[in-house]
Image (cartoon, rainbow, N blue to C red):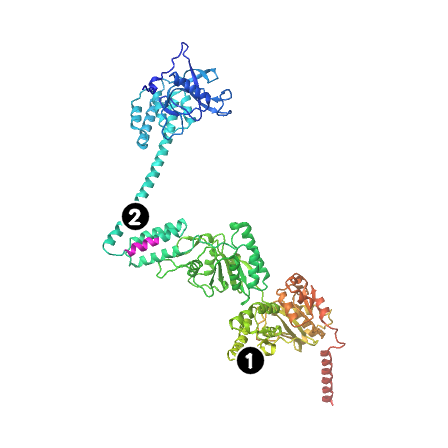
Amino acid sequence: MITKRQITFDDIHNIQPGNDGLVDLPLVVLTDQVLLPNSLMPVKPRNDANRRAIQQGISHQQTVMAVKAIHTETDSDSNTQESQEYERVGTEIAVIEMPPLRYSRESINLLAQGRQRLEIIDILQVTPFPVVRARPFIAEQDANDSDFPQVLRSVLDLFEHLVDLNLLIPDEVAQLVTQTKEPQELGDLIAATLDLSADESQTLLSERNLKKRFEFLLVYLSREINAQEIRDEVETTVNSEMARIQREAYLREQMRVIQSELGETDYLYDELEALRQNILSAKMTAEAEGKAMAELQRLATMPPMSPEASVIRTYLEWLTELPWTKRTRDRLNLLSAERTLAQKHYGLKKVKDRILEHIAVRKLAGDKMNNPILCFVGPPGVGKTSLGQSIATALGREFVRVSLGGVRDEAEIRGHRRTYIGALPGRIIQTMKRAGTINPVFMLDEIDKLSADYRGDPAAALLEVLDPEQNNQFSDHYLEVSYDLSNVLFITTANELYPLPEALEDRLEVIEFRAYTEDEKLEIARQFLLPKQLSAHGLTRRGIRFQSDALLTIIRHYTLEAGVRNLEREIGNICRKITRLVATNRTYPKRITPGLVEKYLGPPYILETRVNQQDYVGLVTGLVWTSNGGDIQLIEASLLPGKGSLMLTGQLGDVLQESAQTAMSYMRSQATRLDVPHDDFENYDIHIHMPEGSVPKDGPSAGITLATAIISAFTERAIRHDFAMTGEVTLRGHVLPVGGVKEKVLAAHRHRIANVILPADNKKDLIDIPKQAIKNLKIHFVDHMNQVIDLVLLEAPEQRQRDLEAEQQSDNDNSSQDECDE
């Protein structure tokens, strides 16, 4: 059997040029491939024309010319070359067929060898494969260029450096390069070892000037060396780290085996390994994990019983037990949240609307909006803390609470540094650990009860906690790493805002809680307090019912508060007495009436303010706001013979005393119009009194009430008893707006006073008042004191009483003088 001999590159000779020095060769256009002289490269024909050209060279054992395509507009299977563009400088190549690899999908493997540079002169043939006429591309070298040897030497030095770095360059290639003396061949051999792009190889191929060609090589060699040095550095670092890890693992395993052979338990190793695993599984920030690993390495080198080891161990346990990424998914169902808030709390419409708005924003905007810092401000017992729990339930978050009442040490917020014995994180971090998630509802209760001493100001430490722009990197003195609090929904509560520093108050979104009205307390008692107390005392199935009048009796005569704590306490007091009757098998009432309330609770603790039932001179009904709601206040004014002094009694504050002086000055300015002799201000003292003298009173809202009482006393015009009023007065009689309008109007409604006088600028506050209360009242809006006088003062008597008394006194004096004369 005769086998066909494999053709080698030695069998293929270069085409000899004609007398004109030109050669005719088949043309092969390569895509993204450039074959330099003296180099080998596998080639892949790009279309049928290229395959025929290569096959022509192989069958006739002759070379072909290869050029790089610039771009191709035609389909890759097209046999035409008319629309193709390619470089004019290419390489004469010899192509042989290689035996196909066993697992290769290619049917033909072609290997090409570069011979010499050629430049295309003309195209002789297009089909079935292109044939071109070309001439050798001769390099130019200036014999007088003294810089070329230095450039050549630099290229060789860089190549030697690259060989030392790159183990992929064979020693045979390096040796061949050092033995080559001809510069053009040397440049091509060096370029073949570099990782050049097709365009860079074409640049070297097309450059006629040898010096420029070697300058290009200098650039490419420098780039290759830099890349190789970076790769070597990265590889060295990776190998070093892997070696360290493997060494540590080997040593630990060796230690474990030795101690196992000795029958000893390596509790320290187990503890360190457990801490290591906890650190890795805690998903800390990079900063915290680096700190924890550094402390773990310190712990591994310490005696286990040393005091510092215990400190480090406790520190690592705090770091690993804190929530770093664990979070609860927000429940963003608005209807469900609204239903939850309605079931837990009655009223509080503005507060509920704010929470529902927050849920809506979270639903649409996600985490783009910072969590608000809410501050619930209001009197005790109105539901501030319990509403925070309801918000957490509505959102589906964990609820945690910290009471700040009496805290006076900054370290309570920020923690103590680890240099102190028994140091711990502050309350913020401790509570976050207790919450177990990074997004709980966090209530800071009684924030207005903070105080400061020589140990620092806790309110100042809260500035970072309660600032959405800063708390994503909260720094606790104990942790010494940043902790993200930006996902927490902070809610603070306070009874008053004035104790808070201005900077802290500026960070809070204040939501005011008003005192509950009687009607609201009644509904809260029905819907929440009664079912809760009946269940707590085991009376749910006993058919106990409280009449509305009975609940109102408790509200009016046994509790005086803004909230409902005492109301719940008194209901529980009644339930206990009924439970005792049930437990002793005695008859118990199933319907609680006002009479039974007084029987079980005793005489009323609180008596209602006595309402004026008759028109009197100098007696007027005012409306006041208290922390427990609104109420009425009687103001009395009397004229006494004297020297024109003003007396004020009833434990009145500075502002209220100034209001009385303003009202008095207004009266004197209007004396002529009101037909009051100016001598009266010199001959009479005026005494103003507010009953319940043990209760402090203050504020400017009694201005028109005081003025009315003073004017009535001087003019002796009676004041209508069915009017109550509130408003601030100026020296010129203008009536200014006041606060607490809702509570004051409801107080008038509760005491069944038919007419209420309010400043005209307070008309906007009627929106907060229940419609039923407004329906049963006649509200008069005034902007000047003259309107108040016209509304409430009756006609003046024909002759004033003090004038009659003065005439009678004068007659008596005259009679006495006559008797003396006789």
| Residue 603, picture quadrant | bottom right
The x, y position of residue 707, in whole percent, is: 67, 70
* Element at label 2: helix
What count of labels does the image hold?
Answer: 2
- Crowding around mark 2 (Cα neighbors within 10 Å: few <14, some 14 to 19, many 20+) is few
Instruction: Give the residues in magenta.
Output: 266-275
Q: Along the horizontal axis of the image, is 181 left or right of 459?
A: left
The three-letter code of the residue at mark 2 reads: Ala
The three-letter code of the residue at mark 1 reads: Thr
- Give the quadrant of the N terminus: top left
Q: Along the horizontal axis of the image, is 162 left or right of 583?
A: left
The correct choice, above or below, for 82 with respect to 266 in the image is above
The x, y position of residue 533, in whole percent, is: 53, 71
The x, y position of residue 204, in whole percent, is: 40, 23
| Residue 529, picture quadrant | bottom right
Can see residue 664?
A: no
Q: Residue furthest right?
A: 798
Q: Which residue lies furthest to the front in this view?
A: 1
**What residue is disc 1 on?**
587
The residue sitting at 63% across, 63% down in the picture is: 768
**What residue is disc 2 on?**
249
The x, y position of residue 681, in whole percent, is: 68, 73
